Amino acid sequence: MEIPYTVEIRRDTGLTNGKIGIWLFLASEVMLFGALFASYILIRTGAPQWPRGDTILNVPLATFNTLVLISSSVTMVMAWASLMRRRLGTFRLYMGATILLGFVFLTVKYFEYSHKFHDDLFPSTNNFLAIYFTLTGLHMLHVFGGMCVNAYLLGPGSKLWETNPKWFTNRVENSGLFWHFVDLVWIFLFPTLYLL
Amino acid sequence: MSQPVAAVGPVTHAHEARHEELSFLRKYVFSTDHKVIGIQYAITALLFLFCGFSLMMLMRWQLAYPGAALPLLGRLLGEARMPGGTMLPDFYNELGAMHGTIMVFLGVVPLAVGGFGNFVVPLQIGAPDMAFPRLNMASYWFLFLGGVTMLASFFVAGGAAQSGWTSYAPLAIIAPGQTMWLVGMIFLITSSLLGAMNFITTIIQLRAKGLTFMRFPFFVWAQLVTSFLLLLAFPPLEAAGVMQLMDRLAGTSFFLPSGLVVSGQPLTVAGGGNPLLWQHLFWFLAHPEVYVLILPAMGIVAEVIANNTRKPLWGYRSMVYSIIFLGFMSFIVWAHHMFMTGMGTTMAAFFQTTTMIISIPSVVILTALVISLWGGSIRFNTPMLFALGFLPMFGIGGLTGLPLAFNIADIPLHDTYYVIGHFHYVVAPGTIFALFAGIYYWYPKATGRKMNETLGRIHFAGSFVCMNVIFMPMFFVGLAGVSRRLFDGGASYAFAQPVLHLNVVSSWGAWILALFQLPFIVNFFWSIRHGEQTGQNPWEATTLEWAAPSPPPHGNFLVAPEAHRGPYEYSVPGAARDFLPQFEA
């Protein structure tokens, strides 16, 4: 049994199933992070004092990480564009780079976290650190999830290219949409936690 | 359906041949077929409904006869819970919290959305399956994991959650048992999110050719709106769940204010959190959740009423616009659960106004359903009896909600049995009656046989009486001011003495209600093999699910169906029969 519109677009909606699915998923993700940002605002406005992010957190490292994630979004687009130009080799290169950049991001984050723990700064220390660890931790889980999907598409998932290149390209595009979303969340997280 | 779907016919057969070879495990356990998954959801949900009902029957013993030893069963539950058969307060609290959690998240929602949604929606829109069959399987198994986690929590040290299904902070953070509840909820939320994405995509993308949105059966509309509520309202609770888990495990203070003293000891946490934040995030989900409980029920009732009055639904378009508006409004009424938290009058005025406004589309839908009966030649079969039972019961539930919506009137009624009565009229003789109607109505589609009418009528009559015996007294108990949270049902309060006997009435109603479920259970299993055999359209209905064989094979339709007209063309003047199916040209 074949499910229609997994590869071809449906003419009256102009979309494939996967495209709608991923956007709906992103909508729910917006609500998830939206709720956490809203909680941040509520707790911060109710606090008698609140530390400025840059007095506790390492801004240069986070700036570096921002650049890393933005670059990974660029390589993600290039990976998809390579498939559109039917070049599997270039796709592999760019997809590998995307995963590697995600790995760099997580490594930097690991050093940031362990430095905080070394300085006896834990989620339980105060509510600034609580929200910092919760938001960035959840974001890191998303980065990791995106990396897993990308690794699948680079490895065993890429067999689909031989049998159904269009479907495979759609999958890479949808995975890319998620990756850009994860990037975008960080673009909000960085100023909110580190600079304000 | 355009080009690609026309090709589905032959492909289906080729695939089916391959499907025969699937092992038992792949066919019935880890199936990707929406019908099997729907039935898995339904059976799991029915078991959990029974489980949640049993917890409540235990509580009703304690409420009717506080402190008395429960004969036989009491000793089986162990010394830690009921020493000598007498219930301990902690155990009562566990039962209360888990009754709510199980009934809402593991009973009604999985049956209404997971069960009926999965089984009926793809058939009603003429689709071969859901848009993402493997995701669909994952949704079911996440629900299953969530259910197992919730049940297992009764048997771990500290027991199950004790802080009510609302899990208000800071109590939930310092009380035992809550961690398992939170982990279970995260599984259930994941399940609902995946399901919601799948339903919306399926309904938008896999509609049969000619099935425009305004030709949707009302049930499909109900599921579409419900899915949007699940998709957008659940993530904030997930966020709140993560924060509560952090509070419990990592020692953060998201919901813990400064200077909290527990049992005479100051809590050693950083503090600075806000307990009201939990309430806001919780009710931001839980109010739309109430509509998740009721909208699919309205959808089922609409189907059954149109079919058995042999008339089009009165005001189909108004009903559709109402349900969309209802879905939207349900996101901005949540703080009417929080009038007692000391919010300012401006906020209270806002939320009581939106709450008043949301009652309008509900009344429109209910009124349209009642007017649909007018002048119909009504067939009083079991599904129709339950659908007709739904109308006044949901009406009572809805109307008794009005005083709760007003800031001033809510103050004396808040957290009393009046609220319990109101809510349960909506979901128990309301939603659950609609779900029973759905089971009797679609059973022939799932099995090829009808359920027994006589047993069905006994089930309906007994349930209808008992439901009212249980919940009507609660209004009086509540108006007398008895709090819903009391372990002894008010026995230790002087003001509650005149209404205590009503607790006994409610309890006996509940136990007898359990007896009246026996005909249903027998009927359900007996009819699988011995029910009256039926063709593909036993109710002479018009919607697309009746174009498929009963039971439908993998891939559903032998020929891809097309919709030629609206969903409820019954008794069209000049037609040869009293129904014109959507699928007949």
Image: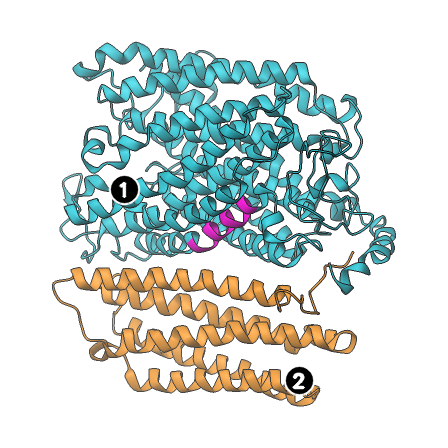
Chain colours: A orange, B cyan
| Magenta-colored stretch includes residue B154 | no
- The amino acid pointed to by label 1 is His
Q: Quadrant of the C terminus of chain A?
A: bottom left
Q: CA distance from mark 1 to mark 2?
A: 52 Å
Near mark 1 (Cα within 10 A), the count class, few <14, some 14-19 or many ≥20, is many
- Residue depicted at 75% across the width and 49% down the height: B26
Q: Is residue B388 left or right of residue B359?
A: right
Q: Are marks 1 and 2 on the same chain?
A: no
Image position, residue A148 (x, y; %): 57, 71
Helix or strand or loop: what does disc 2 sit on? helix
- Residue depicted at 46% across the width and 83% down the height: A104
Q: Which residue is mark 1?
A: B336
| Magenta-colored stretch includes residue B231 | yes
Q: Chain of mark 1?
A: B
Residue B413 visible in image: yes
Q: Quadrant of the N terminus of chain A?
A: bottom right
Q: From what the image shows, is residue A149 above or below residue B580? A: below
Q: Chain of mark 2?
A: A
- The amino acid pointed to by label 2 is Met
Image position, residue B271 (x, y; %): 19, 56
Q: Is residue B403 left or right of residue B124?
A: left
Image position, residue B18 (x, y; %): 85, 54
Q: Which residue is mark 2?
A: A84
Asked whether B558 or A151 is in front, the reply is B558
Asked whether B534 or B481 is in front, the reply is B534
* Dominant secondary structure (helix, strand or loop) of the stretch shown in magenta: helix
Please state the extent of the stretch shown in magenta in the rendering.
Answer: B221-232
Asked whether A126 or A12 is in front, the reply is A12
Image position, residue A118 (x, y; %): 29, 74
